[in-house]
Image (cartoon, rainbow, N blue to C red):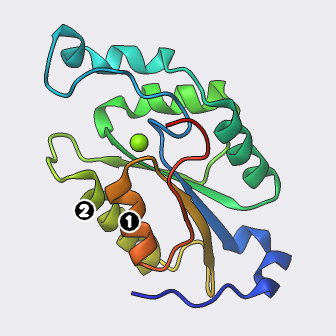
């Protein structure tokens, strides 16, 4: 699906502009833990409060919110870590409109999962009639390709690997 070209008039109503950020690997450093392996994998959720922020990306999200844009966070983290994640976002000064999380136990690959989350956003007409998604940032190439294939201006990652 191709989104309509951004109408610059929308920027006079910044609350009709949406931006999308990923959590791990974008707003915070991902823990270098191999999926499903080692004792730390089981305890991953206990590590989330200590996640190291990526300052450039946190700053970008803060600036978007300050500009009046609506910040949506789409993460593959499960719902069970919502309180920890919300607390981390608060501690790092990120004001957001909504946090989308993976239903507990949902095994979908991140690209498919976030495509479904995006469907929910678009079906709602979020953030409003004629709203635009200005950009999406995600470090997972499958997710970034999904956003791009749906006509969304996409950044895979702003710094580092
Ligand atoms: Mg990520």
Which picture quadrant has residue 42?
Answer: top left
- How many residues crowd mark 2 within 10 Å: few (<14), some (14–19), many (20+)? few
* Image quadrant containing the N terminus: bottom left
Q: Give whichever of 57, 18 is nearer the camera.
A: 57
Position of residue 129 measured from the top left corner of the image (x, y, whole percent) = 61, 86
Extreme residue toward the front, this view? 161
Write down which quadrant ligand 1 falls in. top left
Extreme residue toward the right, this view? 12
* 24 lies left or right of 7: left
Position of residue 106 measured from the top left corner of the image (x, y, whole percent) = 16, 47
Q: Is residue 73 above or below residue 93?
A: below
Residue bearing the label numbered 1:
145
Instruction: Name the residue located 42 percent from the left edge and 60 percent from the top edge.
Output: 144
The alpha-carbon separation of the residues under discs 2 and 1 comes to 11 Å
Instruction: Name the residue located 57 percent from the left edge and 70 percent from the top edge.
Output: 153
* 133 lies left or right of 59: left
Q: Is residue 26 above or below residue 154?
A: above
Judged from the image, the secondary structure of the residue bearing numbered disc 1 is helix
Which numbered disc, 2 or 1, marks the residue closer to the eye? 1
Judged from the image, the secondary structure of the residue bearing numbered disc 2 is helix
Residue 94 in view in this figure: no
Instruction: Name the residue located 68 percent from the left edge and 31 percent from the top edge.
Output: 55
- How many residues crowd mark 1 within 10 Å: few (<14), some (14–19), many (20+)? some
Extreme residue toward the top, this view? 39
Does label 2 or label 1 sit earlier along the sequence? Answer: 2
Marking on residue 112: 2
């Amino acid at each position: 699906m191709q989104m309509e070209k951004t109408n610059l008039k929308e920027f006079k109503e910044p609350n009709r502009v949406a931006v999308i950020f990923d959590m791990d690997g974008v707003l915070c450093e991902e823990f270098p833990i191999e999926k499903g392996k080692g004792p730390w994998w089981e305890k991953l959720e206990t590590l989330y409060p200590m996640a190291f922020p990526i300052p450039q990306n946190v700053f970008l999200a803060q600036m978007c919110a300050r500009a009046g844009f609506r910040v949506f966070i789409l993460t593959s983290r499960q719902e069970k870590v919502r309180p920890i994640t919300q607390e981390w976002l608060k501690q790092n000064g990120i004001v957001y409109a909504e946090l989308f999380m993976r239903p507990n136990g949902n095994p979908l690959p991140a690209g498919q999962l976030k495509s479904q989350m995006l469907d929910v956003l678009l079906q709602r007409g979020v953030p409003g009639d004629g709203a635009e998604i200005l950009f999406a940032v995600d470090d997972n190439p499958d997710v970034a390709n999904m956003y791009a294939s749906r006509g969304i201006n996409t950044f895979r990652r702003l710094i580092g690997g």
